[in-house]
Structures are given as structure tokens and as C-alpha cells.
Image (tube, rainbow, N blue to C red):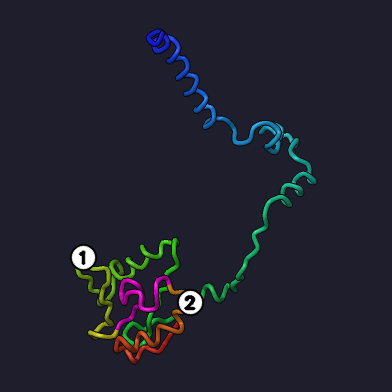
Amino acid sequence: MDERFNRWLLPPLLALLFLLIVYQYVSPACPGAACPRRPPASAARRGGGPTEREGEEAAAALPRLVAKFPFARGELCRRVRFDMRGRDVIVFLHIQKTGGTTFGRHLVRNIRLEQPCYCRAGQKKCACHRPGGDKDTWLFSRFSTGWRCGLHADWTELTSCVPAAMERRGCAGNRTLR
């Protein structure tokens, strides 16, 4: 009986199982009355689409996206002068799960500068000194100074921690925070 089952009954059962799985992936997302009805493309061209009231109901059902922090256009398009040779420091605010690690790594390794950051093979931190200087740094980030203000420090922690951390590094002239 076991041989007969394997030979005649198993292949059709496996084929049926395969077809059921394929049907789940190919079938429409919401079967039956669960989906909102859309008119066929030919009806939409003839003007047989949803009425104005149905359109308003559909729009009301969608969540409204309201700007939580509406920035003025002038604020978004303003120009900021960064003086790498002066006292300015870029403070990189690392936000988790936003590509911050990759961006921070690009800041120290791939930007074409007059004096690029010096990175040793096998080390995560790089020395980002100002042109003509050997101690003063222009970048405060995980890949240049390490986690001086704690792991994933937020804006409040950074604004209170960076000036003191820069002074400890011997960069007393770095007072400008942007």
C-alpha cells in the first residue's frame, strides 16, 4: 500500500498543494466584498466612474498627513557658511535606523577636502584635523571623536556635552555650535 500511495496519490497531492500556494500569491489582495469596487477602465473613460460623494468618502477614509514641523521655505533654503579653517565644528547627530552610520562613514572617508581625514586601516575612528593644524578638529562625530556624549546622544545631550568634550580634547577655540 505504501508503494502505491507514493506512486499514484502523492504527485497529485503535491501538485494541488503547489497550485494552492501559487494561487495565494497570484490572487487579488482582497477577495469578494472586502475590496472597494473600482469601475473597469472602459467605464472610467466613458464617465461611469465613482460619483463625487463616493470620492469624498474615499478621501475621508484616507489618513491625513499634516506637517508636524512646518518649516518656512526660507529656513529650508538658507545658506550657512562653514569655515573649516576657523572655529566652526560640524556636529553630526546620529539617529538610529536612518542610514546615519553609512553617512557618518562617508563624512570621514569619501569627502574631497583640502586636508582629508586620516584613517588607519582596521580602526573605526579617523583624525579629521583642520588644514594646517594637527590637533584641532572640524568634525564631531562617532567616526572622528567616538561616542564622547554617549551612545546615540540626542540633540539635548549633544548641545550640553559638545563644548566640554571639545575643551577636553584641547580644542578650546571651538565654541561655535550650529
Indicate whether residue 145 is drawn in magenta.
yes
| Quadrant of the rendered image containing residue 167 | bottom left
- Could you tell me how far apart the alpha carbons at marks 1 and 2 are, in whole angstroms? 30 Å
Type of amino acid at the residue the image marks with label 2: Trp
Placement of 3 over or under 113, stated as above or below: above
Q: Which quarter of the figure is the N terminus placed in? A: top left
Residue at 57 percent across and 30 percent down: it is 27
Q: Nearer the viewer, residue 11 or 62?
A: 11
Magenta segment, principal secondary structure?
loop
Placement of 168 over or under 121, stated as above or below: below
Q: Nearer the viewer, residue 8 or 54?
A: 8
Indicate whether residue 121 is drawn in magenta.
no
Q: Earlier in the sequence, mark 1 or mark 2?
A: 1
- Disc ID at residue 7: none
Percent coordinates x, y for residue 77 in the rendering: 52, 73
- Disc ID at residue 122: 1
> The magenta stretch spans which residues?
137-152
Count neighbours of disc 2 (C-alpha within 10 A) and say few if under 14, some if 14 to 19, many if 20 or more. Answer: some
- Disc ID at residue 155: 2
